[in-house]
Image (cartoon, grey):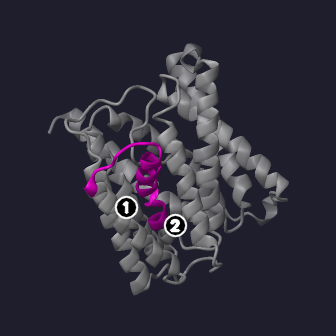
Amino acid sequence: MSSKSWFAWAALGVVYVVWGSTYLAIRFTVESMPALLSAGARFLAAGLVLGALVVLFAGVKALRMTKAQFGSAVLIGFLLPAWGNGLVVLAEKHVASGLAALLVASVPIYVVILRRIWGDRPSRTTLLGVAIGLVGLAVLVFGGPVEGAHGAAWFGPWLVLLAALGWAVGTVLTTKLPLPSNPFALSAVEMVAGGVALAVTGAAMGERFDLAEITTGSWAAWIYLVLAGSLLAFSSYVYVLGRLPVSTVATYAYVNPVIAVLLGFLFAGERFGLAQLGGGLIVLVAVVLVVRAERPAPEVSVPAGKIPEPCEVPR
């Protein structure tokens, strides 16, 4: 294995582990931080830092984009970081982090359904995967709460499914809207736009930061989300897209939930019953079917500024 190939696989390993661990980090963040304000501050900080790095290494011209491209980036920022991540953060006050990750694994299933609505014709294997996935999601939603979660409100799992729908819509739109050619500039605008939307919504809902109440664990988890979840993992994702087959990179969609469930078990005392474990396994099987069925043959390179279907989800 060449040094470049080894580095690409190491970067994919970062995506596997770090994006899988963000669910546990969110759980610890919301223990003492306001949900939407903390998420907004996270994406604002990460977006501004990433934008500064783009200017530092590529110059101000790398941030230039047309009005249409800028509008697309802002819209996707509202759908992915704001709608998608924001609802997951709210939900993790009521559901276990591992369960949230398993429900978010439904994104590729949503994407296929949306593409069918918009005129695409998925293969029979893809549609079979969608049907199996819907069964698994039903088991997860109605299988009861997971031991070790903050709470057990009935609407928690539904919030995660609504979040996954927002991610899916944003993912599909990235293949249809005009986007800037620099993917890092695109991500910076997305995160800043999403961060502003989250902060404004949180303030409107009455959230306030009480610095005296924030624990060291919540601060550590929040910093981890900024540096590792939003900067390191996304940069690794963009790097591996140009060096490994897209179908290989897409495997993170069913590795992340496994990592999240394991970390929730080890560090948050989350315990799944047989129903949740069975439902999670069904969902993962469905996602494997969908990802494999949607694999292009032969592999094609990803145009700059485009995010491949079916699974891109910024963490």
**Residue for badge 1:** 130
| Residue 217 is at least partly visible in this image | no
* Residue at 28% in and 33% down: 243
Q: Nearer the viewer, mark 1 or mark 2?
A: 1
- Tell me the SS state at disc 2: helix
Q: Quadrant of the N terminus?
A: top left
Quarter of the image holding residue 247? Answer: top left
Where 143 falls versus 257 (above or below)?
Answer: below
**Position in image of residue 190 (x %, y %):** 60, 36
- What is the chief secondary structure element of the magenta stretch? helix
Q: How many residues crowd mark 1 within 10 Å: few (<14), some (14–19), many (20+)?
A: many
**Residue for badge 2:** 100
Indicate which disc residue 267 carries: none
Q: CA distance from mark 1 to mark 2?
A: 19 Å
> Does the segment drawn in magenta span residue 93?
no
**Position in image of residue 28 (x %, y %):** 60, 66
Of residues 253 and 210, the one drawn nearer to the viewer in this rendering: 253
**Position in image of residue 264 (x %, y %):** 47, 72
* Residue at 31% in and 55% down: 126
Mark 1 or mark 2: whose residue is earlier in sequence: 2
Quarter of the image holding residue 26? Answer: bottom right
User: Is residue 170 rendered to the left or right of residue 29?
Assistant: left
Figure label count: 2
Q: How many residues crowd mark 2 within 10 Å: few (<14), some (14–19), many (20+)?
A: many
Query: Which residues lie in the magenta part?
Result: 101-124
| Residue 196 is at least partly visible in this image | yes
- Tell me the SS state at disc 1: helix
* Residue at 20% in and 38% down: 297
